[in-house]
Image (cartoon, rainbow, N blue to C red):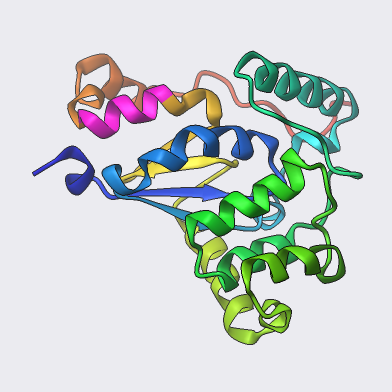
Amino acid sequence: MSAAAAAPARWYFDVVSPFAYLQWQRLRPLLGTHGIEPVPILFGAVLDALGQRGPAEIPRKREFTYRHVLWQARQRDVPLRFPPTHPFNPLAALRLCIAAGNAPHAIDAAFAWIWTEGRAGDSLEALAPLCERLGVDAALLSSDAVKATLRDNTRAAIEAQVFGVPTLQIGDTLFWGDDAHDFALAVLHDPSLLDDAEMQRTARLPVGVTRRREPSA
């Protein structure tokens, strides 16, 4: 049995993330051969569940993140143009992916619309031309079934303890971010990489200090 068959993989993503767009370029050709299932989720709901702010909600981190992802894209010769605003509400674009059957070509198109062409993806109106291009009835984006699927996907991510996007889940193990791509593929091919003593020890490493959450007097 192959490693992919032994360890089913799910790729949790939100189109609001430029790093998801970057990883998609490398992951897309591997979906069939490695049995990877793309799963659109609402990153904002994950942040809410964790009580965390996203990188774009911290001003100086936002500036760094945008410049860093743009530099990475240029290093790889991947075209990247930011949409008119960011962060933006990705609900309509995520629902479009689902309404299109979560097909790779539809995810391709959604990422390209937002991150290659730099277009708005924050409303049904903005995405109407893309719906037409994909042959998707725009009314489906507001259907109960599509909305429920996105909620279920997001709930599954939270239950799996996903804490960021993109995240590749292999079995019970989470690999967060585009920069973990090579590590994730290595484990996908050889799950025993996580079995050595030091890898196992990190899962049991005691916490030495806990930061106080309330301001000190």
Identity of the residue drawn at 66% across and 81% down: 140
Residue at image coords 73%, 50%: 113
Q: Can residue 216 be seen in this view?
A: yes
Quadrant housing residue 96: bottom right
Left or right? Give the position of 41 relative to 79. Answer: left
Estimate the x, y position of residue 46 in percent, counting from the top left: 63, 53
Q: Can residue 40 be seen in this view?
A: no
Q: Where does residue 86 sit, x and y in percent of width and height?
A: 86, 43
Quarter of the image for the C terminus: give it.
Answer: top right
**Front-most of 173 and 141?**
141
Q: Does the magenta stretch include residue 185?
A: yes
Q: Is the magenta stretch mostly helix, strand or loop?
A: helix
Residue at 33 percent across and 45 percent down: it is 172
Depth order, front residue of 74/87: 74
- Tell me: residue 157, above or below residue 78: below
Query: Is 157 included in the stretch rendered in magenta?
Result: no
Total number of numbered discs in the rendering = 0
The quarter of the image holding the N terminus is top left
Up-down: is 180 above or below 125?
above
Tell me if 17 is positioned left or right of 23 in this view.
right
- The residues colored magenta run 182-190
Is residue 97 or residue 167 the one in the foreground? 97
Give the camera-side residue of 147 and 83.
83
x, y percent for residue 199: 29, 20
Q: Name which quarter of the figure residue 169 lies in.
A: top left
Residue 169 vertical position relative to residue 144 in the rendered view, above or below: above
How far across and down, in percent of the image, does residue 84 sit? 91, 44
At 63% from the left and 66% from the top, the residue drawn is: 134
